[in-house]
Amino acid sequence: MGKILAVFLALAGLTAGVAMYYLQVYHFYEEVPATGPGDVQLTAQASQTPEPLPHDDFKAIDADSSPIRYRACFTTDARPSDLRETYAPYPEAEPLNAPFWFDCFDAEAIGAALEDERAQAFLGQRDIEYGIDRIVAVTEDGRGYVWHQINRCGEVVFDGQPAPEDCPEPPEGY
């Protein structure tokens, strides 16, 4: 009887592990269809408003389970040196890992390109959701990447602290 119970528990654990892996890596993600010029935007330094960035080959994924699961890839004729003059930089950009099957987005390679200054990160949109910024990185060879990142205000509020004075008031429930 003990052997049967042990086998049952091992199979139940294995099944739960496989299900959890599948849910985290595949199930919650959905492809985001391209909708046009507004798919990739950069925030202008002068007006602090997002403006479309001309692009091609847009691919994106997202999940309702978390506001920081958004990832996108695209190509553009714009170069970081040209964009720096007009658009707001995002110096604290840290690309977040994407599921392995979304192979156009390699967070480690993007991070290395940002460190080596082969890419530049820009603010796409501040507070796309409270405490979450959309970041856009563009490389010298015209590849682009988009992800969501928790901003300074979000870090504080999501840890249960009151919003700093220079941050917007969080919505109810935060």
Image (tube, rainbow, N blue to C red):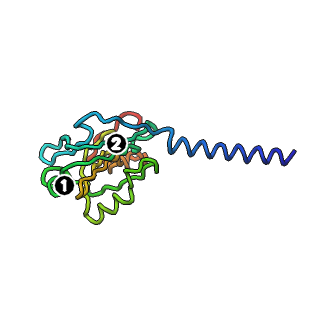
Which three-letter amino acid code belongs to the residue tagged 2? Lys
**Would you place residue 141 above or below residue 51 in this image?**
below
Please give left or right for residue 115 compared with residue 48 in the image. Answer: right
Name the side, left or right, on which 100 lies relative to 72. Answer: right
> Going 36% across and 41% down the picture, which residue do you hit?
60
- Please tell me which of labels 1 and 2 falls first in the chain: 2
On the image, the x and y values in percent for residue 126 come to 26, 44
Q: Amino acid at mark 1?
A: Arg
Q: Which residue carries the number 1 mark? A: 79
Q: Secondary structure at mark 1?
A: loop
Q: Quadrant of the N terminus?
A: top right
Q: Which residue is mark 2?
A: 59
Q: Is residue 45 left or right of residue 69?
A: left
Q: Position of residue 145 (x, y in %)?
A: 31, 50
Tell me what residue is drawn at x 55 percent, y 43 percent.
22
Query: Which residue is more in the foreground, 130 or 9?
Result: 9
Residue drawn where x is 34% and y is 60% of the image: 111
Above or below — where is 16 with respect to 173? below
Badge 2 density bin: few <14, some 14–19, many ≥20, Cα 10 Å: many
What is the C-alpha distance between the residues marked 1 and 2? 19 Å
Find numbered disc 2 in the image and state the secondary structure of the residue it sits on.
strand
Residue 28 in the image, given as x and y percentages of width and height: 48, 38
